Image (cartoon, rainbow, N blue to C red):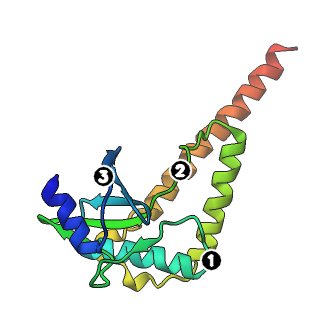
Amino acid sequence: MTDFRTGIEETYGMRIREIRRVKDVFRIRTPLGTYCLKGYDVQVEEVFYIARVFACLDERGFTRSPKVYPTTTLSPVMIHQGSVYMLTNWVHGRQPDFGSAADLRKGLRALARFHAAAEGFPAGEAPASRIRYFDLEKDVSDYKDLLGYYEKKIALDNLIERASSC
């Protein structure tokens, strides 16, 4: 961990007071604030793309995405022993409970704002490995079939209910 810590300090030009693993990220406390260092198990081009998406969202006024802190060489990523990392702001808060109507509403509003801010993002910038809509038509068809099944089942259940109440 000492080599890792030294690597972070040198790469970002910071002095770390504390570094602690929290779930799948590292919480880094410095005299200037608290940061999140996330490791990515993908190609470096994908992480550059993710950083670009975050920057674009920020430029368009979306305040719920991470703010990327560049290295001293102004790169959005750090590579340490072959692994790719990105430093962002630390978000204080709690994990939402989507079983709660209030949390679900807040989550849906944030998702709607995200999609509005992301609209028109140049898809051509996406590395081929990030394009995941090649099966979208089949997925939509499968969802329609599934929903159709439930619509038919609900209609059948209503018919049975009405027949049994006679």
Task: Tell me the mark number nearer the camera, choosing from 3 and 2.
Answer: 3
Tag 1: amino acid: Gly
**Mark positioned earlier in the residue sequence (1 or 3):** 3
**Mark positioned earlier in the residue sequence (3 or 2):** 3
Tag 3: amino acid: Ile
Could you tell me residue 13's position as x and y percent?
A: 29, 74
Q: Which residue is mark 1?
A: 61
User: Quick check: 70 above or below 6?
Assistant: below
Instruction: Name the disc covering residue 19, or none.
Output: 3
Could you tell me how far apart the alpha carbons at marks 3 and 2 are, in whole angstroms?
44 Å
Instruction: Name the disc covering residue 83, or none.
Output: none
**Mark positioned earlier in the residue sequence (2 or 1):** 1
Task: Tell me the mark number nearer the camera, choosing from 1 and 3.
Answer: 3
Could you tell me residue 10's position as x and y percent?
A: 21, 72
Could you tell me residue 80's position as x and y percent?
A: 16, 66
Q: Secondary structure at mark 3?
A: strand
- Residue 150 location, quadrant: top right
User: Quick check: 126 above or below 151?
Assistant: below
Instruction: Name the disc covering residue 143, or none.
Output: 2
Q: Is residue 92 left or right of residue 61?
A: left
User: Quick check: 75 above or below 101?
Assistant: below
Tag 2: amino acid: Tyr
Q: Could you tell me which residue is drawn at 88 percent across and 14 percent down? A: 166
